[in-house]
Image: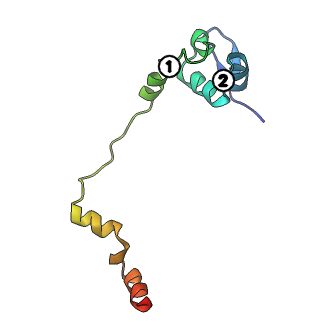
């Protein structure tokens, strides 16, 4: 299984599995550290000492607001209740 190789600022190339084994964390935590920074001091820091990396990672992700005008309460009820679906009404009519 090929793991992605990350280049650190000191020129060394590591994988998330190597960082996880050295630091003693899970591979997903090592992957998150490697995505957040390429500084070897922060990548190889002990557990629970790199909490300041996560805001940096969150800043990289741009949040796009695609919400349109908020629907009215009545429109939300009609959209979310299946009773207003004609096939659902047909099924309920045949049951009773």
Q: Secondary structure at mark 1?
A: loop
Locate residue 54, reporting x and y percent.
Answer: 48, 24
Residue pictured at 60% horizontal, 17% vertical: 47
* Residue 53 falls left or right of residue 18: left
Residue pictured at 42% horizontal, 26% vertical: 59
Is 30 above or below relative to 40?
below
Provide the residue designation for mark 2.
Answer: 25
Badge 2 or badge 1: first in the primary sequence: 2
Neighbourhood count class around disc 2 (C-alpha, 10 Å): few under 14, some 14–19, many 20 upward: some
Is 36 above or below relative to 11?
below
Q: Secondary structure at mark 2?
A: loop
Residue closer to the observer: 67 or 42 = 42
Locate residue 40, reporting x and y percent.
Answer: 61, 11
Locate residue 41, reporting x and y percent.
Answer: 59, 9
Q: Which mark is residue 59?
A: none
Provide the residue designation for mark 1.
Answer: 51
Q: Quadrant of residue 48?
A: top right
Is 75 above or below relative to 40?
below
Q: Quadrant of residue 3?
A: top right
* Residue 44 falls left or right of residue 91: right
- Looking at the image, the residue that sits furthest to the front is 96
Residue pictured at 23% horizontal, 53% vertical: 69
The answer to whether mark 2 and mark 1 are in CB contact below 8 A is: no
Real-space Cα distance between discs 2 and 1?
14 Å
Q: How is the image coloured?
A: rainbow
Is 9 above or below relative to 81?
above
Neighbourhood count class around disc 1 (C-alpha, 10 Å): few under 14, some 14–19, many 20 upward: few
Q: Quadrant of the N terminus?
A: top right
């Amino acid at each position: 299984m090929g793991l992605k190789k990350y280049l650190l600022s000191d020129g060394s190339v590591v994988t998330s599995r190597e960082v996880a084994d050295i630091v003693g964390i899970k591979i997903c935590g090592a992957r998150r550290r490697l995505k957040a920074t390429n500084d070897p001091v922060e990548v190889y820091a002990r557990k629970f000492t790199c909490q300041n990396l996560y805001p940096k990672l969150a800043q990289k992700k741009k949040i796009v607001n695609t919400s349109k005008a908020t629907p009215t309460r009545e429109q939300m009820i009609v959209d979310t209740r299946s009773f207003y679906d004609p096939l659902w009404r047909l099924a309920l009519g045949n049951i009773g």
